Amino acid sequence: MMSGEIKTIHELEEKSEQKTKTPPYYNVYLINDDYTTMEFVVHVLEEVFHKSSVEATQIMLHVHKNGKGLAGVFVREIAETKVDTVHKLAKENEFPLRCAMEKV
């Protein structure tokens, strides 16, 4: 083996850190409106975001009182899918419920 091919532990750790850089995360929020029922918001939180009934109710009340509430934190592709799914379900059920994502 030639001495030029030997890597130091520091070089290997540096290379490993570059490869395992974590992807950015996005907060996904539900936005309050005056027409979507509380029951539907809870349903969305349970079905799309896999929240328990208690947690879904707490988030729904937060959305109702504060204008928006955090439904979850995901990598970009999953966050986009969640937002699209919420909008599709809302449209199918004739509600104007909106969902948005913001980079963490």
Image: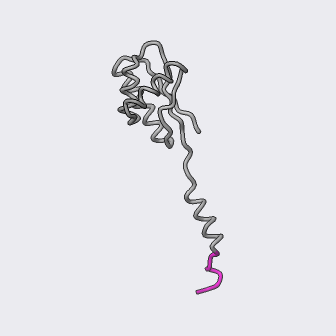
35 on left or right of 69: left
- Quadrant of the rendered structure where residue 84 is? top left
38 on left or right of 73: left
Q: Which residues are magenta?
A: 1-8
Labels in figure, total: 0
User: 94 above or below 25?
Assistant: above
Instruction: Identify the residue at image location x=49%, y=19%.
Output: 64
Q: Residue furthest front?
A: 54
Point out the image quarter for the C terminus.
top right
Relative depth, front residue between 53 and 68: 53
Q: Is residue 6 magenta?
A: yes
In the rendered image, residue 74, in percent from the top left (x then y), is placed at: 49, 41
User: 22 above or below 80?
Assistant: below
Q: Is residue 19 magenta?
A: no
In the rendered image, residue 81, in percent from the top left (x then y), is placed at: 43, 36
Secondary structure mostly seen in magenta is loop
Point out the image quarter for the N terminus.
bottom right
User: 67 above or below 15?
Assistant: above
Relative depth, front residue between 63 and 78: 63
93 on left or right of 61: left
Instruction: Identify the residue at image location x=47%, y=37%.
Output: 79
In the rendered image, residue 38, in percent from the top left (x then y), is placed at: 40, 19
- Quadrant of the rendered structure where residue 89 is? top left
User: 13 above or below 69?
Assistant: below
In the rendered image, residue 12, in percent from the top left (x then y), is placed at: 60, 70
